[in-house]
Structures are given as structure tokens and as C-alpha cells.
Image: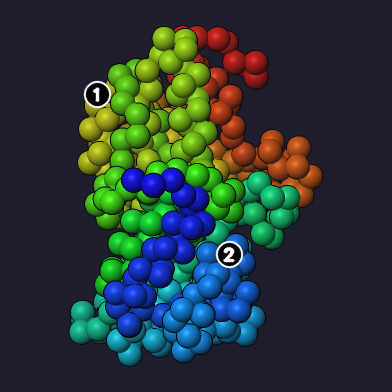
Amino acid sequence: MSETTCREALGKALADAMAEDEKVVVLGEEVGVYGGAYGVTRGMIDRFGAERVIDTPISEPGIVGTAVGMALEGLRPVAELMYVDFLAMAMDQLANQAAKIRYMFGGATSVPLVLRTQGGTGRSAAAQHSQSLEAWGAHVPGLRVALPATVNDCYHLLRDAIRQPDPVLFIEHKGLYVSKGELGRKADAPWGRAHVCREGSDLTIISYSRMLHYALEAAAMLAENGIEAEVINLRTLNPLDEETIAASVRKTHRAMVATEAALSFGPSAEIAARLQEACFDHLEEPVLRVAGEDVPIPVAPNLERASIPDPQLIFEAACLLLRRGPRPAWI
């Protein structure tokens, strides 16, 4: 194992995939000479050439549409959109074409593309560059959605995504690129399976992406108060590993879902609904959701921070759920 950053792990995953398979190509705005919006593809154009690391015009429909065509012709394109917020401009190509073609052609062809993008708060990028829109992708049948949380996720989850026969929306968090961690030789879990990051017996906290780190911080705070939380990293929303999260909840009898995405109609609602259906007889309390506020993301750093959960809020919500520990200040 070696320590590296999420940015470096993503770049290594792309480079290793391209070295192993000449059908893997990278395209997007400034992925070549500039090295990508957050430096993930830096140096790749020198190693693999401009025919495989392709700078495109500023056109999200063009980028994704081109990737669909490449995939249909037998390539494995990895396209990059600078921000997940710009997904709205490419939804026809992604949701109506890439995600539907294998079904519409009776399985005779597939669209093995990966659409890398990034979202989330933390850089005061304001309302149009800071959203968490993974629910958009997870709602589309035929489209897979992956969200790495750790260095090991960034490498192995991206490698697995590139191998998939279906299109994958791969959403990185802008606040994790410089995060450091150990890169192991194996993934923490197979594709489509969640990873139990911390074992516990009192409640289950389910999360992904950067919010997973907040959940782990909250779990450490809970442990100081005699509460042992089990923390699960989902890794993918579609497929969703219901088996792992349900098994945990049947053991702990209490569940919380922590996400940065807005509360209303978001991933936390779907996960909570499935747990209520699968584990109703095992739950001692309703599933609790801790999620982003239903507001556009502010540019002011203090307001931006206030728009999403933090470790303290997760800690206090867990205490409320368990009816133990310090009384939250907000009730």
C-alpha cells in the first residue's frame, strides 16, 4: 500500500486503463494540454497522444454525444464534464441515448462509456457550480452511478467503472481531490457493493462521497460518548447494495442516512424508503435523514457551510435518534 491523493489515484486509474486497453480514450474540455479542470489528466496527452486524449469544444452535448458514438463503435470513452451542474445540458445524450440504447436494441449492442464529473460544496463556487445531482442519474434506468469517497475508491471504482458494459456517471467531490489515503492493491468491495468502514452495534450511518468522512468523524465523537456507530460507504447508488445496508440495520435496529444532496426527493429519501420496506420489523425508530438544505448553494463560505450537514450535526442527530448523549442545541 502507498499513500497518495484522490487526484493522483484517479489519474493513475485512467493511465493504467489506457495502458492496458488501447480502446480506452479520454475526451473533454481542457483534458489534454491543460490536464483537466482539477488536474486529473495532467501529463496524459504527452504519454498517450492527442488521438487518445482529446480536447473538445465547450459543448456538453457534444462531449457526451461524441462519447456515445465512440462507445457504439467499440471504444471505451471516458468523458469529462467540468461540473455536474452542467449535466442538464447533456441529459438527452446521457439519459435518452446512452442509457437506453442497449435495451432498445435488445442487447445487441452496448454503450460502455464513463462520464466523469465533480460536484459538491467547499470552494465557494456558488449555486451553479456546487450542486449534488447524483439523484438525477440514479433515477435513470440503464445508467450506473458511482461516487468515490476514498483514495482506494478513486482508483479501483474508476477502474471497475471503465470495465462496465453500461454507461456510468462517475461523480467525484471537488473537496476530496487533495485528500490523502492509502491505495491498496484491491478494492474495498466489488463493483456495486458497499463497504462497512467502521463496525458498530448501536446504529447504522449510511453515506458516500465526502459526507462519508463527516460520518466517520461523527462516529468517533459518538464513541467518546459510549455509542458505537456502524458506518457504511455505499460507493455506488446504482446499483444500490441493499443487502449490506439491510444486514447492518437488522443488527443495529437504527439507521441514519447522511448526504450532501438536498433533502427533498434526494438519495436519502430513496435509501430510507428501501430500508423501511426491507427492515420495518427490525427498526426501533424511523430512519433518520441528515441532508443538505433545500436551497441554492450560497457563495459566502459561512452560508455554504451552513447549507450542508457537518460532523457535529450528524453527531447530534445520532444522539437524538438514540435518545442518548448530549441534547442537540437545535431542539
Residue ID at (55%, 59%): 118
Regarding residue 266, the answer to whether it shows in the image is no
> Is 265 in front, or is 73?
73
**Quadrant location of residue 61?**
bottom right
Tell me the mark number nearer the camera, choosing from 2 and 1: 2
> Is 228 in front, or is 177?
177
> Is 163 in front, or is 260?
163
Q: Which residue is mark 2?
A: 39
**Could you tell me residue 48's position as x and y percent?**
44, 81
Residue ID at (63%, 44%): 294
Q: Secondary structure at mark 2?
A: loop
Question: Is 111 above or below relative to 311?
Answer: below
Regarding residue 260, the answer to whether it shows in the image is yes
**Could you tell me residue 153's position as x and y percent?**
38, 51
Q: Secondary structure at mark 1?
A: helix
Q: Residues within 10 Å of mark 1 (few under 14, many from 20)?
A: some
Q: Earlier in the sequence, mark 2 or mark 1?
A: 2
Question: Is 284 above or below relative to 46?
Answer: above
Q: Residues within 10 Å of mark 2 (few under 14, many from 20)?
A: some
Q: Amino acid at mark 2?
A: Gly
**Could you tell me residue 83's position as x and y percent?**
60, 64
**Quadrant location of residue 145?**
bottom left
**Residue 251: mark in rendering:** 1
Q: Amino acid at mark 1?
A: Lys
Residue ID at (46%, 79%): 47
**Quadrant location of residue 206?**
top left
**Could you tell me residue 303's position as x and y percent?**
75, 39
Please identify the residue farthest to the right as the structure is shown. 300
How is the structure coloured here?
Answer: rainbow
Disc 2 from disc 1: Cα separation: 42 Å
